[in-house]
Image (tube, rainbow, N blue to C red):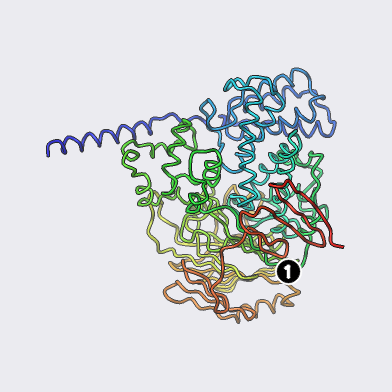
């Protein structure tokens, strides 16, 4: 007994020591203070347009300082610097070329390389940015010694080539974990484009152009006349609100599809220039036709992989491919993964990293020794678990007038960090969505219009989407008290007409209509914030409803489907709505279809259970299983066949 009494304080002191160590661990700044603007994008534009660059050394000074200090997103800036060197090196002063070379040779290119910093290496876009930059750096300076780790360029090429191959394989088989992100797809595109254009490895080049094809297929199949705002794994407030204000790809879309002037090709700058200046890539005709197809289409797709699938898929472990899939999903503290996370962070000494520092509290020796990390994670249900970007089974319905997309039954009743599970786009200036705000401010993730405190049970059938929220929930560990309302983004400034009638809201944009039905009366909110960009904040843009059990129903239509706006309103108001079983069952009938959603269980359409687990692609454009070896895309008589295993990237046309 006396030994037992001695063990208890010893264990307590042991745990306290590790906790104090985590609290005192120094965090390395992720950004300069004060923040500084760099000008590498401006220099690239000047070089591309033969504009004067007398002050190039002065303009690049801050870029060199930023990259050499290894601040977060240094890899963004390094890619533009690489293109400046590789494409326009003959225009550079010798001193500038020498500074670029020194910066490239001094950089840290992966988590397991020497040096402590707060760069984010692990998200999906950063993985390919770092890896393709390392490969091109090694190819450019094959015999030079990279001062950070003492390896030469050829050794860095070999390391990077393996990670690039893994990244491409994961994208081909599973799609993007950061699915349909009109934010982070820009960074993916820059890295992919630079690698594909400048690599001397023809097989690597061919494979990367296949991934770029699939990237543009994602965008083409989920855009409305060039407006790309869909459901997404990672979005911020303005990126959810409209293509005009938030689609970071809009200039590149107009570059490829000039018939859709959603962007400005006269002012393409920043990371997009790394794609626009690519002299090799030609958009396949099938993908061009998919963007311009105006026939009504149901477009199904599977993106990413679930946490509970990873072990069976051989993607749980310490190898680069395994870590890339896990960390690329932003999956760190889920019960299945938390021990793997801790092991890798210890191995790579990353607890000083600003982003990883909070995870120092899982580096508790007692918990590791007795394998208690997973049970602890399961018991606490920390909101950090739901940062993980799980598999998104996306249902999209697109006509010539609108597009609606939903990640079907995604993460019901879990926190959404930056996930955007539903979007209805009526015009390039107008997209509608719903969320349960995490707080009454727009800073951080999740917040007022970023992510969601908890996700609804969401389901879509054709042009109708249903969402059920349960606000009467038990808080999880570290969660703040939830707000007592959910809301929709409803910006009257961008509508030609709108009507609010108790629990109904209607709007018209041109010849496109939207109806919103709520479980309670709707009221305009009064939120203000910097995330809203250039919006006129004196005008209403947010509708709220209150109550512990809530639903939202969205239905889109148009002049060609319903005739006048008045006819549409009359028809929708006559549609039967039943909210039963204490807020667990919601049924809605429209145009001969009866849709029933049973909270946290399933959806039923016309008496049949709805399938919400999709193939890799399933539409008129492509029917492809997950993990297929070959993908064929077709539209308008054009066909594109992609098979990286056989190095086939082939276009053919129906006679």
Give the x, y percent position of residue 267.
78, 42
Residue at (64%, 47%) from the top-left corner?
183
Residue 203 showing in the rendered view: yes
Task: Choose between 49 and 18: the one closer to the eye.
Answer: 18
Against 57, residue 128 (above or below) is below
Vertical side of 29 occupied by 249: above or below: below
Q: Is residue 602 left or right of residue 462?
A: left
Q: Position of residue 454 (x, y in %)?
A: 47, 58
Name the quadrant containing residue 497: bottom right
Query: Pointer 1: what residue?
Result: 296
Residues 592 and 264: in front is: 592
x and y percentages locating residue 548 in the rendered image: 43, 67
Q: What residue lies at 74% left-to-right and 77% top-to-bottom?
A: 563
Which image quadrant: the N terminus?
Answer: top left
Examine the image and state in which quarter residue 297 appears: bottom right
Secondary structure beneath dot 1 equals loop
Total number of numbered discs in the rendering: 1
Above or below, 105 against 282 in this view is: above
Mark 1 neighbour class, 10 Å CA radius: few under 14, some 14 to 19, many 20 or more:
some
């Amino acid at each position: 007994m006396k030994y037992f009494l001695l063990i208890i304080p010893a264990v307590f002191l042991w745990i306290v020591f590790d906790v104090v160590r985590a609290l005192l661990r120094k965090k390395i700044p992720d950004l300069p203070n004060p923040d500084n603007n760099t000008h590498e994008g401006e220099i690239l534009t000047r070089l591309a347009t033969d504009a004067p660059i007398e002050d190039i050394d002065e303009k690049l000074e801050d870029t060199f300082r930023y990259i050499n200090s290894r601040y977060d997103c240094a890899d963004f800036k390094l890619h533009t610097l690489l293109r400046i060197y590789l494409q326009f090196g003959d225009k550079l002063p010798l001193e500038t070329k020498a500074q670029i070379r020194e910066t490239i040779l001094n950089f840290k290119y992966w988590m397991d390389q020497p040096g402590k910093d707060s760069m984010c290496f692990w998200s999906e876009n950063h993985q390919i940015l770092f890896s393709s930059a390392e490969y091109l750096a090694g190819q450019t300076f094959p015999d030079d010694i990279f001062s950070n780790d003492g390896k030469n360029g050829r050794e860095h090429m070999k390391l990077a080539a393996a990670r690039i191959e893994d990244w491409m394989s994961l994208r081909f088989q599973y799609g993007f974990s950061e699915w349909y992100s009109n934010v982070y797809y820009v960074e993916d595109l820059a890295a992919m484009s630079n690698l594909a254009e400048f690599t001397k490895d023809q097989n690597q080049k061919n494979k990367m152009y296949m991934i770029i094809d699939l990237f543009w297929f994602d965008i083409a199949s989920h855009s409305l006349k060039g407006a790309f705002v869909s459901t997404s794994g990672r979005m911020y407030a303005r990126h959810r609100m409209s293509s005009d204000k938030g689609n970071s790809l809009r200039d590149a879309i107009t570059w490829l599809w000039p018939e859709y002037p959603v962007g400005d090709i006269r002012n393409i700058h920043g990371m997009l220039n790394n794609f626009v200046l690519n002299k090799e890539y030609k958009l396949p005709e099938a993908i061009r036709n998919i963007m311009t197809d105006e026939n009504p289409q149901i477009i199904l797709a599977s993106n990413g992989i679930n946490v509970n699938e990873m072990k069976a898929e051989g993607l749980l472990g310490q190898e680069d491919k395994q870590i890339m899939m896990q960390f690329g999903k932003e999956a760190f503290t889920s019960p299945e993964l938390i021990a793997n996370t801790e092991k890798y962070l210890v191995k790579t000494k990353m607890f000083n990293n600003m982003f990883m520092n909070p995870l120092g509290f899982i580096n508790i020796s007692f918990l590791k020794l007795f394998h208690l990390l997973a049970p602890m994670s399961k018991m606490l249900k920390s909101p950090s678990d739901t940062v993980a970007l799980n598999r998104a089974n996306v249902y999209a319905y697109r006509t010539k007038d609108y597009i609606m997309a939903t990640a079907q039954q995604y993460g019901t009743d879990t926190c959404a960090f930056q996930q955007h599970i539903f979007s209805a786009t009526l015009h390039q200036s107008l997209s509608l969505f719903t969320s349960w705000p995490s707080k009454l401010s727009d800073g951080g993730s999740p917040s007022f219009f970023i992510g969601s405190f908890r996700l609804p049970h969401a389901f879509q059938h054709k042009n109708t989407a249903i969402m059920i929220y349960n606000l009467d929930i038990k808080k999880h560990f570290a969660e703040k008290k939830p707000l007592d309302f959910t809301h929709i983004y409803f910006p009257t400034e961008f509508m030609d007409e709108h009507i609010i009638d108790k629990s109904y809201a209607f709007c018209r944009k041109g010849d496109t209509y939207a109806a919103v039905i709520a479980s309670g009366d709707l009221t305009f909110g009064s939120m203000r914030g910097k995330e809203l960009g250039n919006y006129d904040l004196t005008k209403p843009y947010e509708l709220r409803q209150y109550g512990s059990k809530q639903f939202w129903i969205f239905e889109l239509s148009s002049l060609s489907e319903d005739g006048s706006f008045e006819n549409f309103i009359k028809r929708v108001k006559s549609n039967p709505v039943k909210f039963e079983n204490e807020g667990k069952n919601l049924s809605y009938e429209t145009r001969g279809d009866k849709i029933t959603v049973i909270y946290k269980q399933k959806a039923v359409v016309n008496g049949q259970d709805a399938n919400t687990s999709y193939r890799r692609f399933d539409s008129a454009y492509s029917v492809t299983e997950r993990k297929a070896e070959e993908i064929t895309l077709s539209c308008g008589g054009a066909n594109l066949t992609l098979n990286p295993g056989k190095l086939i990237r082939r276009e053919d046309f129906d006679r």
